[in-house]
Structure formats: C-alpha cells, structure tokens
Image (tube, rainbow, N blue to C red):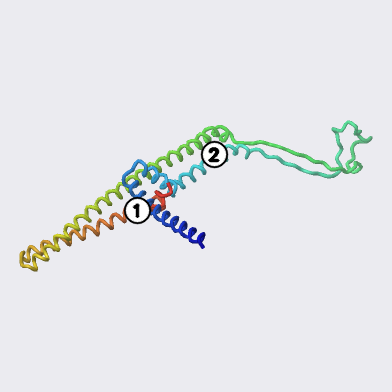
Amino acid sequence: MTRFILSFILAFQVTVTFGQNNVKQTENWQETFFQSSDVVLPLLIDAAITYSAQIEIADAAKQIAIENQKLEKKRILSGISVGAGYTYGSVFNFVDPTSTVPVGGVNPFNLPAQPRYNITAQASMSLYTLLSRRHELQRQELQIKQTDANRKIVEREIRQTVINLYQGVVLARAEQEISQETYQTASLRFKLAEKQFANREIQIDAMSTVQESHARARIAQETAKIRYATSILSLEEVIGMKLADLMNTK
C-alpha cells in the first residue's frame, strides 16, 4: 500500500512538472519570437523554402534540364544500327580453303544445304548534327545554370516575403497592445462619466463625447485584434505550420 502511494505521488509530481514545462515552453517561444529576430527569421525562411511549391517547381525544372542533357549526350548513338540475319540453303563457301570447286562448275542444286548467320553494323549521322552537337550540349548546360538562377530568385522572393510578414506580426502585436491600453483608459473614463452624468455633474454633450471616444477605442481594439490574428495566419500559411510548433521543435 505504501509503495502504491509513493508511486502515485511520484507520477503526480511528474505530471505537474511536465505541465509546468509545457506552459513555460509556450511562453518562451513567444518571448523568443518577438525579441530575437536574428534567431527566428532563419527558422521561418527555412520552413518557408521547404514548404514552398515554387521551390519544388524550380527543382523539377532543373531535373528536367539534367535529363535533357543526358539524352543529348546519348543522341549520337541514334545513328548507329546493328542488324543480324539468318539464311539456310545451298551456298558454296568460297572462303573455306578446304572446299573444292566441283568439276563442270558450281551447281547449287548439288551442294549441301547449310545455315548462314550474318551480323551488320552501320553508323550514319547528318553533317548538321555533327557540327551542332557541341553547341547543343552548351545550350543544355546553360539551361541547367538558368534553373539554378531561377531557384535563387525564388528563394530571394521567399526571404523577402517572410521578412515582411514577420515584421507585420510584430507591428500588429504592438498595435494590439496599444489599442488594449487605450480601450482600458477609455473604459475608465466612460465609467467615470456615467457616474458624473448620473449626479448631473456633466452635461449630455460631454457624456456623448465620452461615449464616442469609448466606442472608437473599442472598434480600434477589435480591429487590432483581427489584424494581429490575420498576420499570424498569413505567416503560418507561408511556412506551412503553426508558429508554436516551429518554435517549440527548435
């Protein structure tokens, strides 16, 4: 019974510690995200490049160019042909030194029937193909270099997009915090104005001014909240994962 109680207490302590660590981990990634751009931006850029469909297209284009180059190098073999044949019948072998010519000439009908095999090889290629082969191979090499350049352009665009989105998240968070403070101040003024209006310490026009100010602060707060959430969703769409998942796995 004592062992059971000790095991239960130990398991409870581990669970509590694990939960506290998760909370601290969640808080730590937000602190790092907003205060250490030199650490966060490389992570965001790498994730965006890995997730980008444009990068996949660029890599596929390079692979196609490489395969085309391989085909061009082997195209010279298209002019080479090899053939084989088989015949059977009465054929006098003039090459065989052991054979003798029959008296009265060669009569095919009197010769023994025997099989004959033959293999032929030939090569043919147009003069244009021969002269343009070197230029065609150079063109294929330039196409591979072009795909590398296109990939660099795509990477540069992704980096710029991620930087802008990250700065947008940071700015939206600052706007949200300011709007929250402004709304709290406007709420306090509104409550004070209500008391003053109830006690007839202020006129209705002053009360209307406070109400309008309070309404504008509330709208600004909601707008900033939505803008902040949208900026996070836009960044997560580019990197292909949740910000919390990215930061907590690093």
Q: Earlier in the sequence, mark 2 or mark 1?
A: 2
Is residue 205 rendered to the left or right of residue 188? left
* Residue 203 visible in the current orientation: yes
**Residue lying farthest to the top in this orientation:** 97
Percent position (x, y) of residue 69? Answer: 54, 39
* Residue 243 visible in the current orientation: no
Percent position (x, y) of residue 29? Answer: 36, 49
**Residue lying farthest to the right in this orientation:** 103
Near-viewer residue (221 or 184): 184
Q: Where residue 69 is drawn, which disc sits there?
A: 2
Q: Quadrant of residue 149?
A: top left
Q: Nearer the viewer, mark 2 or mark 1?
A: 1
- Are the residues flagged by discs 2 and 1 in contact, CB closer than 8 Å? no
Is residue 82 rendered to the left or right of residue 59? right
Question: Cα distance, mark 2 to mark 1?
Answer: 40 Å
In this rendering, the answer to whether 107 lies above or below 181 is above
- Kind of residue at badge 2: Gln
Percent position (x, y) of residue 213? Answer: 14, 60
**Which residue has dot 1 on it?**
234
- Kind of residue at badge 1: Ser
Badge 2 local density, few (<14 within 10 Å), some, or many (20+)? many
